[in-house]
Structures are given as structure tokens and as C-alpha cells.
Amino acid sequence: MTSTGVEIVGNDPTTNSLRDGNGFMRITRLRLLASDVSRSVSFFRDVLELPAAGNSIQVGWSEIQLMPAVEDVPCGVHLAFNVPYVRFDAAVAWLKARAPLQRDTQDNDCFVHEGWQSRSVYFDGPDNAVLELIGRRRLEHPSGARPFGGADLSCLSEVGVPSSDVEGTVAEAAWTIGVGTIGSASSSFAAIGDDEGVLIAVDPSRTWFPQHRQLPSARGLEIWVSGAKSPGTMSDADHGWKVRAR
């Protein structure tokens, strides 16, 4: 832990540079089940200052469609939102005024991921979701002089997808939609995509960083992506998620 409460996460095998040949995958739409759609809309609209119309939330070029859960609610969904790297400190100050930050066991609440060239903070969302603001140095962003706000969240850039065969999911993504990974994949973790759109494939027994108290869930999630090299559909019947590339 540094004097500013920032933890530097080192270069492990899952946090290397982007592989050559990745396209620029973007998550354009997410269907997300909610135990209380109205409460979830209020969170995204009032806490994160994102535009809302009915059950639809707009995050830059990404849309989140909130749908009522008929059966089990997917508690433990992970979503990340890109913010300008050069405005990350302003993003943290803005978020701290609106929601408690998650901390690790050493009381860090900001994290530098060296291999990803990024900085992150994590916070709770509706239905025990693990949400993240992430600034990625590899992306270009205007600095801007206005106060930081929800309009500075440029997109939904990560969705967690549990898989009992992470390496098989990586192979399926490469074969079906022509998308590789950020860094190397392991048997329990892989980041499929690039800095603008990532599917975080994780073993279902691997708890979410940084608090390690929430198991991943994605039941009922449908994810639409653009920029993949090939159109196609991936799905995981055991864990209830589907990805559509077009």
C-alpha cells in the first residue's frame, strides 16, 4: 500500500500487453436482469449520472437494458466502465462523493494494473454487482476542463462471464468471432477482447477482486458486440450467458 492508498498490481501472466491482431471490439448492448428494475435504473441514473429512458441506460456507445428477473437474479455480475486515463483522479473524487469504494485486505481502494497500463476503482452496484471505473493509458482521451460527471464514462468496457472451461471459452472466441485476449489466458482467468470491450472469462469459483467476497454470475446476460472479426454467437448454457457478435 502506498501513502495514497493505491496498490500496484504487478505483471502476472494474465496482465501482459495486447496481443497483435486484435480488432477493436466494443460492447454495444447488454441485457441485464434485475431484482428491482426501478431501483437499478435509479442507481445508474442518480448515482452514476447516466441518461435513462424507461429501462434503458446509455453509457457512451453502450446501452444497458434492464429486465425483470423471472427466476434467479444474477448476483455477482461484474461490469466496468472506461473513463479518461488523464482524468482518473477526478473520476475517483467524483465517485467517492457518490458511493463507497471497495477496499482490499490492506485497505487500498485504488489499483494500478501495470500490465494493462490502467488504473481502477471498484464499488458495489445493484444486486451485489461488482462495478469498476477504469482508466486505460493506451486509449486516447481529451483532458477536458469541466467537472467530472457521468458523461465522462465513455462505454461499458467489461462484462464478467463465468466459465467452467476458461481456456475453451478463449478458443471458442478465437474460432467463432475472431477475437483474442489481452495477455495470456490461464485456466481460471482470461480477458477476451481489447481495451474498448472485454469479456472477463473467469472460473466460477474465483471471487471478484478486490474484496474477494462475491462469486461471479452472469445468468440471463446477453451481450452484443461490434468490431469482432467474424459475426457469430457464443453461449454458456451452464452459466446462462450469451454473446452476439455482428
Image (cartoon, rainbow, N blue to C red):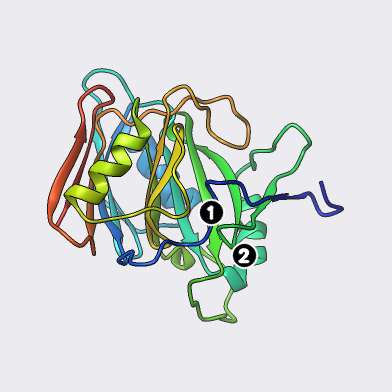
| Mark 1 lies on residue | 133
Numbered marks: total? 2
Badge 1 vs badge 2, beta-carbon distance below 8 Å? yes
Q: Amino acid at mark 2?
A: Phe
Q: Amino acid at mark 1?
A: Leu
- Left or right: 16 with respect to 10? left
**Where residue 155 sits in the image (x, y, percent)?**
38, 61
**Residue farthest along the top direction in this orientation:** 71
Q: Nearer the viewer, residue 204 or 221?
A: 204
- Left or right: 103 with respect to 99? right
Q: CA distance from mark 1 to mark 2?
A: 9 Å
| Mark 2 lies on residue | 88
Helix, strand, or loop for circle 2? Answer: helix
**Where residue 85 sits in the image (x, y, percent)?**
57, 69
Residue positioned 17% across, 48% down in the render:
176
Q: Nearer the viewer, residue 40 or 207?
A: 207
Toward which corner of the image does residue 227 lie, by quadrant?
bottom left
Residue 197 shows in this picture = yes
Q: Residues within 10 Å of mark 1 (few under 14, many from 20)?
A: many
Helix, strand, or loop for circle 1? Answer: strand
Residue positioned 55% across, 51% down in the render:
15
- Left or right: 229 with respect to 34? left
Q: Is residue 189 above or below residue 93?
A: above
**Where residue 147 sits in the image (x, y, percent)?**
59, 72
Residue 30 shows in this picture = no
